[in-house]
Amino acid sequence: MLDREGPVPLYVQVAEVLRERIAGGEFGVGDALPSEAALEEEFGIGRTTARNAARELRRRGLAHTVRGEGTFVGPAGVPRVKPSRALYVPIAAAVAARITRGELRPGRAVPDAGTLSRHYGVARVTARQAVALLVRQGWAVETPPRGVRVADPSAWPRELAPAGEHPLTSVLLK
């Protein structure tokens, strides 16, 4: 729990929590640390405080940041542990599932990159990739200046997945 009234700045307190998690083995060398959006949500802090916490970890030599990818445990040059699949694919699959369930109706707005970034704790560029994938696959259409909207059901992908695989994920992986 953060001491919001104490003399230690919030960003230093957040950095210390992350340092303890690293020391405890929750994050290993090369692992990605939580995104700024995830830190904002978890600790109830602002974006600047989250950025400063990452800067503090870098200052201590515990982490390095790769623009557009995130902050990783260890010094720059240490091989990063990459997710087994691009982060935007399951996000796009989750949005496509909401579309097929009728939670997002044709003609209505698809959640924007900022919303997806905050919800999934990923960088905005990752969220934009998820939206772009939805457009490429036919789940959504770009309608300037209104943004990205859910496509007409006749445009949605129709392929079925191999046994044991989520149908939306297999369609989105193509």
Image: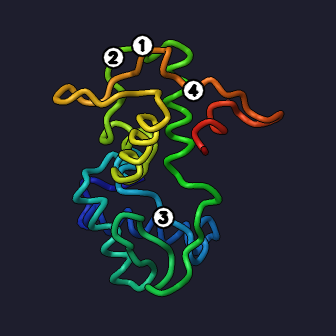
Q: Residue 33 carries which label?
A: 3
Task: Classify 88 as above or below 95.
Answer: below
Within 10 Å of disc 4 (Cα), the crowding (few <14, some 14-19, many 20+) is some
Q: Which mark is residue 157?
A: 4
> How far across and down, in percent of the image, does residue 165 sit?
75, 37
Q: What residue type is labelled 3?
A: Leu
Which mark is in front, 1 or 4?
4
Within 10 Å of disc 2 (Cα), the crowding (few <14, some 14-19, many 20+) is some
Tag 1's secondary structure?
loop
Do the residues under discs 1 and 2 have CB atoms within 8 angstroms? yes
Residue at 57 percent of width and 42 percent of height = 90
Residue at 50 percent of width and 81 percent of height = 74
Q: What residue type is labelled 4?
A: Pro
Q: Which residue lies furthest to the left in this view?
A: 145
Q: Residue 108 carries which label?
A: 2
> How far across and down, in percent of the image, does residue 75 sit?
46, 85
Which mark is in front, 3 or 1?
1
Q: Earlier in the sequence, mark 2 or mark 4?
A: 2
Within 10 Å of disc 1 (Cα), the crowding (few <14, some 14-19, many 20+) is some
Which mark is in front, 2 or 3?
2
Tag 3's secondary structure?
loop
Real-space CA distance between mark 2 and mark 3, rounded to the nearest whole angstrom: 34 Å
Within 10 Å of disc 3 (Cα), the crowding (few <14, some 14-19, many 20+) is many
